[in-house]
Image (cartoon, rainbow, N blue to C red):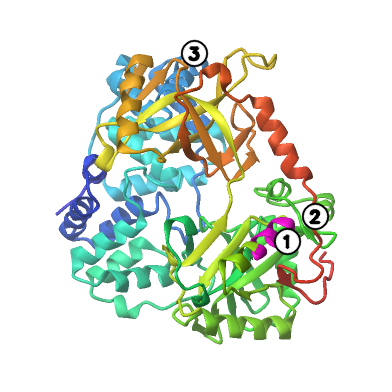
């Protein structure tokens, strides 16, 4: 079967509108099994599961929301500030807003002549966008592409260019399950091949051609990270099956080293080596064997792990200045070993991985976490208090006999944390849910008050998005109240009058200059619905700024005795 880009987007939209994971997997499986060409299957799986470019390609299109919005404004012949921006705010989504505009604006309808582009043709456009150096050039390429597309193709092509989730309730784990179903393989076998190849497209082709057994691990492509589950969601009956370590207030990273070459990857599998030249220099000075390490990058000075907010000042800097490196020195602290001695280690138990990691630490002076035995919840509480005193987020409990469960959030790693704080926020927008909540508004944009803030003309501005934390009955009541407060409707999003107050729990506050507030909340979630409060009781942006400053200035204990990690030399890296 010849599958066009339109066919792929129709399948993606059908997956979004379908309830139930198994039903979604069947739609995707049927699509994959119908594609006769390996080249087309590679692209279809890549576009659906990874985005415009393979995760291991190192390529990014760098088409931001402003570039896409300006292209849409020109294409639709509308004013960017007066028309486009309110539409984007109302929908809560750049791609949704552009889809709706192309569907409804007469000037845009007249310009579009959809031609059922092939997957290869769209791939060429993606590469042209990646190679274009100026915003003006990217806008012209986008307009050229959109003339040949339907609105649903435009929406999903933009999401693919973002290299993130397509937001259809169907993540990479489900895509891999669909590959397994389409070509008659065990899901774990497919997941393993994806982990060692790093490419969903290549994994699909190997499965189609019956060559999964040919896949081999190679250095310098990032591996999917193992994830942790909050301890609250799992009852732990036998603490002795776990070891503990402090959960750092840093940035998760993976280091690949071979023959004096070091590459560093972030949790979203992007290469970030240039942002942290000290880490590269640290590894390049050591005569290590080929190795892949999982760990955390932290700002470390005065024998203290400094706040994440300070690390954030370095994130995204491609070439940090000498002054920045001196003011905010970073250190990579390892806590797991994935590859060494010319062979993968992720299938071995945590105990085996840890023994080999500690040998490397002693021989080559690598910073490695301090692990400790936990025999009771009273002892766990003491370790937790010590972690907080060090300025860390909490604790990790790791099952001793577990293998490295790449890309999974399972029961083998548990995180013990307490919320960073709460804010009373006002619901500003309600977004239609998907899956089992497809008939209800279940995703929400929450805001803080700026009505007495001379910097703003509005009464409330967004501070974060959240969903969950409510019962089915509370969600039904929420939806009933939302109908009374709706003042504008645009696609799947409702704009609301101030009326509903949500106590929002979060892990941390981060600076984000791209937002109106200048801050975003890290992992926001509902704590409770405050039916007893009015919008006048909501917290303010100045409250957010005060909380942020308190976190930055919080006193932290030096590592001293019982440190959270071991590092013998404490050398200064240039």
- Residue 453 located within the stretch drawn in magenta: no
Q: Position of residue 105 (x, y in %)?
A: 32, 16
Residue 460, position in %: x, y? 56, 19
Query: The N terminus is located in which quarter?
Result: bottom left
Q: Secondary structure at mark 3?
A: helix
Real-space CA distance between mark 3 and mark 2, rounded to the nearest whole angstrom: 42 Å
Task: Tell me where residue 242 appears, x and y as whole percent.
Answer: 52, 74
Q: Quadrant of residue 471?
A: top left
Disc ID at residue 325: 2
Within-10-Å neighbours for mark 3: few <14, some 14–19, many 20+? few
Going from N to C along the chain, the mark reached first, 3 or 2, is: 3
12 displayed left or right of 395? left
- Quarter of the view holding residue 55: bottom left
Q: Is residue 441 visible?
A: no
Task: Say whether disc 1 or disc 3 marks the residue closer to the N-terminus.
Answer: 3
Q: Label 1's element? A: helix
Which residue is label 1 attached to? 277
Q: Are marks 1 and 2 in contact (CB under 8 Å)?
A: yes
| Residue ID for mark 3 | 82
Q: Are marks 3 and 2 in contact (CB under 8 Å)?
A: no
Q: Nearer the viewer, mark 1 or mark 2?
A: 2
Tell me what residue is drawn at x 47 percent, y 77 percent: 346
Tell me if 163 is positioned left or right of 422 in this view. left
């Amino acid at each position: 079967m010849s599958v066009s880009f339109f066919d792929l987007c129709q399948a993606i939209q059908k997956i979004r509108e379908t309830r139930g994971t198994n039903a979604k997997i069947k739609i995707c499986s049927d699509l994959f099994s119908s594609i006769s060409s390996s080249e087309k299957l590679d692209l279809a799986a890549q576009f659906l599961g990874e985005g415009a470019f393979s995760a291991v390609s190192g390529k990014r299109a760098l088409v931001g929301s402003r570039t896409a919005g300006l292209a849409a404004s020109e294409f639709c012949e509308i004013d960017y500030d007066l028309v486009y921006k309110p539409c984007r705010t109302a929908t809560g989504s750049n791609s949704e807003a552009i889809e709706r505009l192309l569907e409804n604006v007469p000037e845009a309808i007249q310009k579009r002549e959809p031609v059922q582009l092939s997957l290869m043709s769209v791939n060429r456009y993606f590469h042209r966008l990646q190679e274009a150096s100026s915003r003006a050039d990217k806008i012209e390429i986008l307009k050229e592409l959109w003339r040949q597309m339907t609105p649903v193709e435009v929406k999903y092509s933009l999401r693919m260019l973002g290299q993130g989730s397509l937001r259809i309730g169907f993540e990479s784990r489900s895509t891999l399950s669909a590959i397994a179903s389409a070509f008659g393989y065990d899901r774990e076998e497919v997941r393993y091949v994806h982990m060692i190849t790093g490419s969903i497209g290549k994994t699909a082709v190997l499965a189609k051609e019956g060559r999964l057994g040919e896949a081999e691990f190679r250095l310098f492509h990032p591996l999917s990270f193992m994830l942790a589950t909050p301890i609250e969601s799992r009852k732990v009956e036998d603490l002795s099956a776990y070891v503990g370590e402090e959960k750092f207030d840093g940035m998760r990273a993976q280091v690949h080293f071979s023959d004096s070459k070091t590459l560093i990857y972030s949790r979203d599998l992007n290469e970030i080596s240039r942002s942290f030249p000290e880490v590269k220099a640290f590894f390049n000075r050591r005569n290590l064997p080929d190795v892949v390490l999982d760990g955390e990058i932290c700002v470390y000075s005065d024998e203290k792990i400094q706040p994440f907010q300070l690390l954030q000042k370095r994130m995204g800097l491609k070439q940090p200045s000498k002054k920045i490196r001196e003011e905010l020195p970073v250190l990579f602290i390892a806590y797991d070993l994935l590859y060494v001695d010319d062979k993968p280690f992720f299938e071995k138990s945590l105990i085996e991985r840890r023994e080999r990691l500690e040998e490397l630490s002693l021989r080559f002076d690598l910073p490695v976490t301090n692990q400790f035995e936990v025999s009771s919840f009273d002892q766990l509480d003491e370790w937790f208090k010590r972690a907080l005193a060090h300025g860390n987020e909490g604790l990790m409990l790791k099952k001793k006999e577990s293998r490295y469960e790449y890309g999974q959030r399972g029961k083998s790693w548990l995180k013990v944390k307490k919320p960073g704080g709460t804010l009373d926020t006002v619901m500003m927008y309600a977004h239609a849910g998907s899956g089992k909540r497809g008939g209800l508004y279940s995703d929400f944009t929450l805001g803080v008050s700026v009505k007495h803030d001379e910097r703003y003309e509005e009464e409330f501005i967004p501070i974060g998005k959240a969903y969950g934390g409510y019962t089915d009955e509370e969600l039904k009541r929420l939806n009933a109240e939302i109908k009374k407060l709706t003042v504008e409707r645009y696609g799947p999003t409702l704009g609301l009058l101030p009326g509903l107050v949500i106590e929002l729990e979060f892990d941390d506050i981060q600076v984000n200059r791209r937002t109106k507030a200048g801050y975003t909340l890290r992992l926001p979630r509902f704590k409770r619905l405050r039916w007893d409060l009015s919008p006048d009781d909501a917290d303010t942006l100045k409250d957010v700024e005060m909380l942020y400053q308190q976190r930055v200035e919080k006193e932290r204990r030096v590592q001293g005795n019982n440190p959270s990690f071991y590092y013998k030399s404490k050398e200064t890296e240039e």
